[in-house]
Amino acid sequence: MKNIVVLVSGGGTNLQALIDAQKSGKIVNGKITCVISSNPDAYALERAAQNDIETAVIRRKDFSEFDEYDIALTTLLKEKHADLVVLAGFMTILGSKVIAAFENRIINIHPALIPSFCGEGFYGLRVHEAALKKGVKVSGATAHFVNEECDGGPIIIQKAVEVKNGDTPETLQRRIMEQAEWKILPEAVSLFCQDKIKVVNNIAVIGD
């Protein structure tokens, strides 16, 4: 059974999707053992508490140097015996030490079909604003491993979602969450926990 540690900053809707998937047996050979927040007031911490999941808070602003924060987060994840780290709306940049220590063991969900509308500056509603401005007919979500290139890690799963006439960034965001993010993030986590993902030449290969 692999220990899953989820990093959060806000409301925790993706965390809730993971909790629900775990309860329904959709996450095989894995268990959420800790939720770590960059924000002590994040509602995600309440979601964790309601489900008897251990929590911790680590704030970037409590460290004068980024390197100190990077080391502290790496140490905390190791103390929690994290086999897999999941970014579920974590709004603080990860440092090179965390990424190196957990190579191909950090999964992020991005609300677009990478390589479209991704990279530095593309987060939250900005992603959907850019998609609508471009006039794309489909968007979606991507579950991927995290490396030092923003949104540049190996792609695990993608799911497309229709863009409808009259969509606003808010309506598109909601549809992508419901139809894609909340489905493929637990699926990617379960695949990892079953050792079904291999990374070859920066490409994630899904086995049987």
Image (tube, helix red, strand yellow):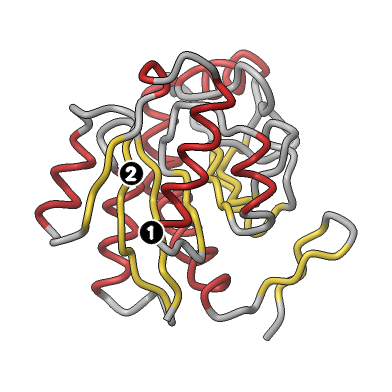
Mark 1–mark 2 distance (CA, rounded to whole Å): 10 Å
Residue furthest out toward the left: 50
Give the SS element for disc 1: loop
Q: Residue 147, relative to residue 133: is it above or below?
A: below
Q: Residue 139, relative to residue 202: is it above or below?
A: above
CB atoms of marks 1 and 2 within 8 Å? yes
The x, y position of residue 124, in whole percent, is 46, 24
- Residue at 38 percent across and 75 percent down: it is 26
Decide which of tag 1 and tag 2 comes sooner along the chain.
2
- Residue at 31 percent across and 64 percent down: it is 33
Q: Local crowd at mark 1 within 10 Å, few (<14), some, or many (≥20)?
A: some
| Nearest to viewer (mark 1 / mark 2) | 1
The x, y position of residue 188, in whole percent, is 54, 64
Q: Residue 154, relative to residue 25: is it above or below?
A: above
Q: Quadrant of residue 97?
A: top right
Numbered label attached to residue 185 = none
- Left-right relation of 171 to 141: left
Q: Which residue is mark 1?
A: 80
Amino acid type of the residue that numbered disc 1 sits on in the rendered structure:
Lys
Q: Residue 156, relative to residue 116: is it above or below?
A: below
